[in-house]
Amino acid sequence: MKILIIEDEKPAQEYLAGLIKQLEPAVRILAKLDSVQSSVEWLRNNTADLIFMDIQLTDGLSFSIFDQVEVQSPVIFTTAFDSYAIKAFKVNSIDYLLKPIDEEELRISLDKFKKLSANDVKPAFDSLLKALQETKQSYQERFMVHRGERLMSVTTDQIAYFEGEDRYVYLIKKDGSKFIVDYRLSDLEHVLDPKLFFRLNRSFITHFESIHSMVNVSKSRIKIELMPKAKREIIISSENSQDFKKWLNK
């Protein structure tokens, strides 16, 4: 079996490749790609028996690959997406693996694809895309967090902003309380309502109501102060400032 891995994080690439080799020693890993562009270029000239594909890549969502090149191979998506996307995967015969990937779930997926005929692939993928298009306007409304042994649910109207710091992402509520969430900021961009939330820079995603003040620090850069106040200075780059201003005018 010849396998292509499309995943934007190098450690995740190596982990998945190692797990596959452990379960199927005879497998050949043809390539490990990290972007939509590199995947499209590879698929125009090559084929694989099976593709493992992350949803969030370095230059966009992997679904756009299928708009640019015909993919004949079965696809197993690896995803950290929320339940509305997972529901779409469940109603189709194309499989998905929720990160962090479990060895037994990977084994089941590989067994499933050994039994899948080539004629099953295209209809299943078309059905998946249709299901995703029908649900793409749904956004996450709650986040489960924990404090010690206690679990609680935080609704998006309680959230002031998200902050990425070191290797963690924190949810900061409007009352100032702070919780670790199991998301990357890049994942949050796709599950939060873009009318209410905006990615300010590499470290912050804010709710509209939590913007306390905005000051021009140059012709195109903007300094933001949030409420509750963040410990770090927040600057919107010149590249992002125009999109930010458009968002404010929605």
Image: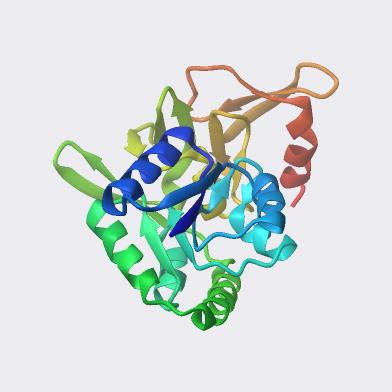
- 43 and 82: which one is in front? 43
Q: Is residue 80 above or below residue 123?
A: above
Left or right, 163 with respect to 18, comes to: right
Q: Position of residue 71 (x, y in %)?
A: 63, 66
Q: Is residue 55 visible?
A: yes
Outermost residue toward the front in this view: 26
Residue drawn 36% across and 55% down? 98
Left or right, 136 with respect to 20, comes to: right
| Screen quadrant of the N terminus | bottom left
Q: Position of residue 87 (x, y in %)?
A: 41, 71
Residue drawn 50% across and 68% down? 74
Q: Position of residue 174 (x, y in %)?
A: 43, 38
Outermost residue toward the left in this view: 149
Residue drawn 45% across and 77% down? 92
Identify the coloring: rainbow
- 2 and 171: which one is in front? 2
Left or right, 163 with respect to 20, comes to: right
Q: Position of residue 194 (x, y in %)?
A: 62, 52
Q: Quadrant of residue 244?
A: top right
Outermost residue toward the right in this view: 219
Report the label total: 0
- 56 and 42: which one is in front? 42
